[in-house]
Amino acid sequence: MICTSVAGRNEKGIKEILSRKETAMAEIRLDLCPVPTSSISGIFRESDIPLIATCRLSDNCSGVKCHERLSAAITAGAAFADLEIEISGKLEESLINLCHRYGCRIIRSFHDFSGCPDQESLQSMTDKCLSSGADIVKIAVTARQDDVRWRNTIASLYSNNPSLEGRLIAFAMGECGQASRIDCIAMGAPFTYCSPDEASCTAPGQHTSEQLSAILYQDRNLRQLDIHQPAASKSYAVRAVIAAALANGTSTISGYTASDDSCSAVHLARSLGATVDELPGTLVISGTGARPGCLSANRISCGESGLLTRIAAPLVSILSSTEFVLDGEKTLLGRDMKPLSDSLEAMGMTVCPNRVNGGLFLPFAISGTPNLTNVITIDGSQGSQVASGLLFSLPLLPNDTVLHISSPKSIPYLNITAQLLEHFGITINKETICKNGNCTMVFHIPGAQSFHPSDIRLEPDWSGAAPFLVHGAIAGRTVIHGMPYPSLQADAMILDILRNAGAFVQSDTGNGHDASVSKSALHAFSVNLENAPDLFPAVAVLAAFCPGESRIEGTERLHSKESDRAEAIMEMLSQMGIDARINCNSMIICGHSLESRILSGTLPVPGEYKSRHDHRMAMALLIAESVSGVRISIDDTDCISKSYPGFIKELS
């Protein structure tokens, strides 16, 4: 990444440089810019790119003045504060505490303007920077023509500290050290410094931003994606359409996107007897006021939607007066439905299974009459969809029911179900019981309830937004308008993941609800995605471009998605030439920055890739192609319409 170092500019001049298309990151030399302290906050607060606040101690800039100016920048949102190693004592302690309080990453820097110390001295200085609070260590020495040892000395810092990839910036100042400002990126530095123009160098040997951009990115352009109408969450849409179909009256669902799964829910609503009028972005549904035994169903199709299947099976079992066949299409036919069968049998239903190699697959027949047992226990370790289906169905039974869910996973989706059911007039009481480290969610569900008609606006989909935001973090900037934050959607955690990976994240919780992610100094991260398995493909691509070894937990949740997603991701990464492995329940990915991959020739390998007809995999492959600039041919991108029909158009 390229950081433009800004010095000698007033407030207007600084903002002009920050507004340039080629400025992706900037260092503001607060000791050299004639800007009053009162104006510093505005510069840092209003910036939509990551900024470094730097203030060097000098005769003209005392410790008190540096503290004042750096504090103004840190509290206003500086992404980094450069604290030279000479800062110590109470000044050091105060600034470090302020950085921790405001989430500002710390650069500890050492400069030698006379020459290059020996390898042992520089290693000692690196260790000192780390021990004094550095998130990033900056070592800048001076290259002299009469002493060529500096090349090997700098290279040794990188080779002797492999764990600091993405956290060490070591280069040589001076005209003969100019190449080291590029070489450091290939060796793993998170960014390098340049000047806005030839007349504004802050250190000898700096390239201009135009020169450095041409070298690092060649013919690639850092792109801004600006998305105004993100797709609606199909998780909300499927639930809302079925709830409206069950209500006795008319409901309006706005913010609707006609994805394949949402259209399958509309088809099922009509099968239940509801009338559905489809308007641009809106559904008007006149429900049937469904009651047990009211439906004569022979065959129910759920398209390719796993959620819809798991809602429809227990629901139609209660509503139907006869045996019916549950069916689906495409990848759904290859997904094991044994946990669903177990839940139906717990209700007293009989499943005539289509068994293959010990698994249970669609289509299969369901018959019988639900029993009136008041306690049902299911295993929630495979996900929340079976439980959501029961929460839709059990309120229609004449008696009260208590639903126990052991080892629950994807809990945010259960909370979405409970919230939406409440919106449509269904009462459900929830508690969590933990004993000896094992937790069970318990839902107390009164019987003989009715769904009430209601109007609802669907939330945009964080699962669909995530790949675009990953794109911004790696290769430019992404702004998505209208994203709800905070949200019950588990995949809203993508913002926290990107922050933890070093991206510059801004989220407006006001009326606009804009989510913005800009490229910054990325680094390895760790995250548990057991509750958000749909994020896995996009986050795996993110990890491939984050220097260091990232760990993503939750691979066991991936085997029964549209594809065996753990296997599919590993196949994708292996074909790209990216080092990755699975250890127990974790995927471990060795990443390098985009710039390092460009310079070292380790960009993803071009070629023909398989999506396995999985919409999340196809999206991840498209993002990998877009950020890297290599040609990736994907066997099936039509599958993306399952959740986000406009994805490719938005990306292009």
Image (cartoon, rainbow, N blue to C red):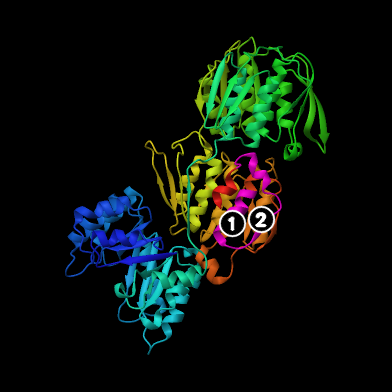
Name the residue beneath numbered marker 2.
572
Label pair 2/1, CB-CB below 8 angstroms: yes
At x 52% / y 47%, what residue is drawn? Answer: 527
First in sequence: mark 2 or mark 1? Answer: 2
Q: Amino acid at mark 2?
A: Met
188 over 608 or under it: above or below: below
Taking the spot 62% from the left edge, 37% from the top edge, the residue there is: 259
Q: Residue at x 59, y 55 (%)?
A: 588
Front one among 629 and 384: 629
Q: Residue 570 location in percent, x, y? A: 66, 54
Spot occupied by residue 357 in the image (x, y as percentages of width and height): 82, 39
Taking the image as shown, residue 77 lies to the left or right of residue 191, namely left
Q: Which residue is mark 1?
A: 624
Residue 389 lies in what quarter of the image? top right
Residue 449 position, x and y percent, is: 58, 12
419 magenta-colored: no
The magenta stretch is 618-645
Can residue 381 be seen in the rendering of this structure?
Answer: no
Element carrying mark 1: helix
